[in-house]
């Protein structure tokens, strides 16, 4: 009888505990299930968003590859760029679209618009490589506009090691624009050395060095 009473008492304790805590346990289980479902739904949403952004960007690349856009084509490309930056602003594709927007603006001779697009990427991107591309292209524009000091300041940013050869190349351009041929030569030779070490093609640098030597020979 004592054993039976003990079992009855234990059962009563379980019933009482369940009465007091059962609702919260069920709620917790429901919330946990909802959390898993919500996370999966969020992941699916993000994957779908990324796929849509990728498709738009590929369309933009196909539209702009190997040609100078004019008129309706240029307007259509800008519409795609706006869609990517407005609707998919947190994706890599939106940032790449802004880099492409800058290239199109340069083709149109609108350097102010190009600089604005590049500055947006440089200021807002969390991706060092993309940010570095923006700094390099901004530096090239500054050299083209006759502002080598501003270009050199941009080249002092923490540019990705993968772009070190391009960084040295543009630095050489800036030094030459400052009429500092020896610094330009050193920078271009550094660019060549880095490109060889990283097994990267770097076009035009040898021509710059050859031209620099030819100019010195005529002085």
Image (spheres, rainbow, N blue to C red):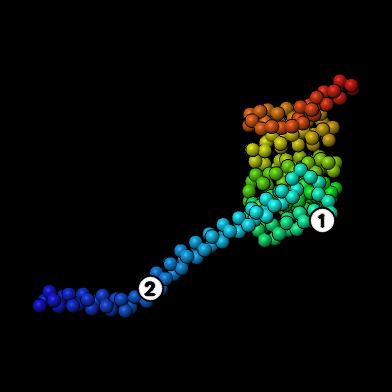
Using the rendered view, name the quadrant where residue 178 is placed: top right
Residue 143 placement, left or right of 132: right
Q: Which quarter shows the C terminus?
A: top right
Q: Is residue 10 above or below residue 51?
A: below
Tell me the SS state at disc 2.
helix
Question: Residue lying furthest top in this view?
Answer: 217
Q: Position of residue 110 (x, y in %)?
A: 84, 50
Please identify the residue farthest to the right as the structure is shown.
219
Relative to the observer, which residue lies in front, 85 or 23? Answer: 85
* Residue 218 point in image, percent of width and height: 89, 21
Instruction: Give the quadrant of residue 6.
Output: bottom left
Near mark 1 (Cα within 10 A), the count class, few <14, some 14-19 or many ≥20, is: few
User: Along the horizontal axis of the image, is 196 left or right of 42?
Assistant: right
Of the two numbered discs 2 and 1 on the same chain, state the one appearing first in sequence.
2
Spatial CA span between label 2 and label 1: 60 Å
Label 2 packing within 10 angstroms: few (<14), some (14-19), many (20+):
few
Residue lying at 82% horizontally and 23% vertically, measured from the top left = 213
Image x and y of residue 191, in percent: 71, 31
Q: Which residue is mark 2?
A: 26
Query: Which of the image's four quarters has the N terminus?
Result: bottom left
Is 57 drawn above or below residue 12 in the view shown?
above
Visible in this render: residue 121?
no
Q: Secondary structure at mark 1?
A: helix
Identify the residue at image location x=29%, y=76%: 17
Residues marked 2 and 1 touching at CB (< 8 Å): no
Q: Which residue does the image show at 42% across and 71% down from the upper left? A: 30
Q: Say which residue label 1 marks.
A: 72
Comparing marks 2 and 1, which lies closer to the viewer?
Answer: 1
Q: Nearer the viewer, residue 1 or 103?
A: 103
Instruction: Tell me where residue 11 sits by quadrant.
Output: bottom left
Q: Is residue 69 visible?
A: yes
């Amino acid at each position: 009888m004592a054993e039976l009473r003990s079992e009855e008492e234990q059962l009563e304790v379980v019933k009482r505990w369940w009465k007091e805590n059962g609702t919260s346990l069920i709620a917790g289980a429901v919330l946990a299930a909802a959390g898993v479902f919500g996370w999966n739904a969020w992941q699916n949403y993000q994957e779908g968003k990324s796929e849509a952004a990728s498709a738009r960007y590929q369309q933009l690349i196909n539209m702009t590859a190997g040609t100078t856009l004019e008129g309706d084509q240029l307007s259509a490309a800008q519409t795609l760029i706006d869609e990517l930056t407005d609707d998919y602003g947190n994706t890599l594709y939106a940032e790449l679209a802004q880099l492409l927007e800058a290239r199109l603006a340069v083709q149109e001779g609108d350097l102010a618009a190009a600089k604005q697009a590049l500055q947006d990427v440089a200021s807002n991107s969390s991706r060092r490589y993309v940010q570095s591309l923006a700094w390099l292209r901004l530096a090239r524009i500054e050299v083209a506009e006759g502002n080598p000091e501003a270009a050199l300041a941009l080249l002092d940013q923490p540019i990705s090691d993968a772009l070190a050869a391009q960084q040295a190349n543009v630095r050489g351009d800036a030094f030459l624009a400052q009429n500092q041929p020896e610094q330009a030569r050193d920078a271009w030779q550094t660019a060549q050395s880095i490109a060889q070490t990283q097994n990267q093609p770097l076009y035009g640098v040898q021509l710059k060095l050859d031209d620099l030597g030819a100019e010195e020979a005529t002085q």
